[in-house]
């Protein structure tokens, strides 16, 4: 066994031991895999696809006076092959944080809150993962070497967060900024996100509304030079109908041409069905299709019929 493998195994065993000895440390994760028939520009294949499976460890220590120290370690892996999903073992998330009445300070590697405030809320059926995830959304942030501050609730349900990633005096890295606003009140949620990486930027606004068994979502994003030259607007709408253990899902997204690149637009639609075997386990199926114009630099014609299973723990 390689030395790195021994170290990883020892770290996992140590974390598991801590979880049994300290109630403030939890192990969590998700297994999510689909069997798919894919058509990529006329090339048809059958394959197993991982949908952002992961295992994580998180914990907090009460320091007294309302002050808490915390950490998150999260590893992404491919269920279909057993290999790591990212280049680093803890590449999905690895952070330390300090929270209290002042809010929360975070440092490490973590996903842009601008994404969580907007696009992540709209992919209802498969948690914005796998081949049916939004192919048009422009994510331009960098997750590594970040510090962030999250405010306490200004009013009930309203928080903001801002983050910056350091370039560490390296010409290979660009300092990135991201900002998010979240507001939730009963069945309504509103999210605003902004990211900037050098001259490239994007901003988006999204909202969801629960109306009995129906769930509605919508998002509009505007980006500059993210995938092509100039400015571009893309939008997505979604609806879900929940009845018993069943869920019916539909969403549609449309991206305009970049202002300096004709025929660079694209569209995507997905229809899906989920059946919840329990609160943690579901089986599902979906069909997703991307239609890309000939000069689109970020997507190609693609379709997939998928059958999958997701288990949270």
Image: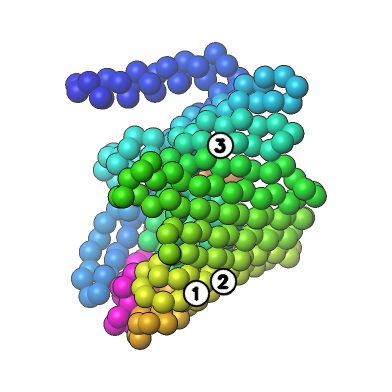
Q: Which label sits on residue 106?
A: 3
For mark 3, give the secondary structure.
strand
Q: Nearer the viewer, mark 1 or mark 3?
A: 3
Q: Which residues are magenta?
A: 292-307
Q: Percent x, y for residue 94?
A: 45, 35
Residue 2 in view, yes or no? yes
The answer to whether the residues at label 1 and label 2 have Cβ atoms under 8 Å apart is yes
Q: Quadrant of residue 81?
A: top left
Question: Could you tell whether 271 is left or right of 22 in the image?
Answer: left
> Mark 3, mark 2: which one is toward the viewer?
3
State the residue position of label 2: 220
Which residue occupies 65% across, 26% down?
68
Q: Secondary structure at mark 2?
A: strand
x and y percentages locating residue 208 in the rendered image: 66, 63
What x and y, as percent, mark residue 28? 50, 33
Mark 1 and mark 2: Cα distance apart in space: 6 Å
User: Pointers 3 and 2 in contact (CB under 8 A)?
Assistant: no
Task: Tell me if mark 2 has few (under 14), some (14-19) or many (20+) residues whose alpha carbon lies within 10 angstroms of its own.
Answer: many
């Amino acid at each position: 066994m390689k030395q790195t493998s021994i170290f990883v195994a020892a770290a996992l065993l140590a974390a598991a031991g801590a979880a049994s000895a300290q109630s403030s440390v939890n192990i969590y994760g998700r297994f999510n895999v689909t069997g798919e028939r894919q058509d990529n520009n006329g090339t048809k294949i059958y394959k197993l696809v991982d949908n952002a499976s992961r295992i994580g460890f998180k914990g907090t220590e009460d320091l007294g006076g309302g002050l808490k120290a915390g950490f998150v370690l999260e590893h992404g892996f491919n269920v279909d092959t057993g290999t790591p999903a990212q280049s680093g073992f803890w590449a999905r998330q690895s952070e330390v944080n300090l929270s209290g009445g002042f809010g929360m300070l975070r440092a490490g590697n973590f996903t842009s809150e601008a994404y969580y405030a907007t696009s992540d809320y709209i992919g209802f059926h498969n948690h914005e993962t796998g081949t049916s995830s939004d192919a048009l959304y422009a994510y331009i942030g960098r997750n590594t070497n970040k510090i962030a501050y999250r405010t306490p609730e200004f009013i009930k349900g309203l928080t903001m967060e801002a983050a910056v990633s350091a370039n560490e005096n390296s010409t290979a890295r660009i300092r990135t900024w991201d900002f998010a606003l979240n507001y939730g009140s009963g069945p309504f949620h509103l999210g605003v996100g902004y990211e900037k990486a050098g001259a490239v930027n994007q901003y988006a606004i999204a909202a969801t509304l629960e109306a009995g068994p129906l769930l509605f979502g919508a998002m509009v994003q505007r980006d500059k030079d993210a995938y092509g030259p100039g400015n571009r607007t893309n939008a997505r709408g979604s609806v879900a109908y929940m009845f018993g253990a069943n869920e019916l899902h539909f969403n549609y997204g449309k991206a305009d041409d970049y202002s300096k690149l004709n025929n660079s637009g694209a569209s995507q639609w997905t229809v899906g069905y989920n059946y919840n075997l329990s609160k943690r386990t579901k089986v599902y199926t979906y069909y997703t299709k991307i239609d890309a114009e000939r000069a689109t630099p970020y997507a190609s014609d693609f379709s997939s019929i998928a059958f999958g299973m997701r288990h949270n723990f």
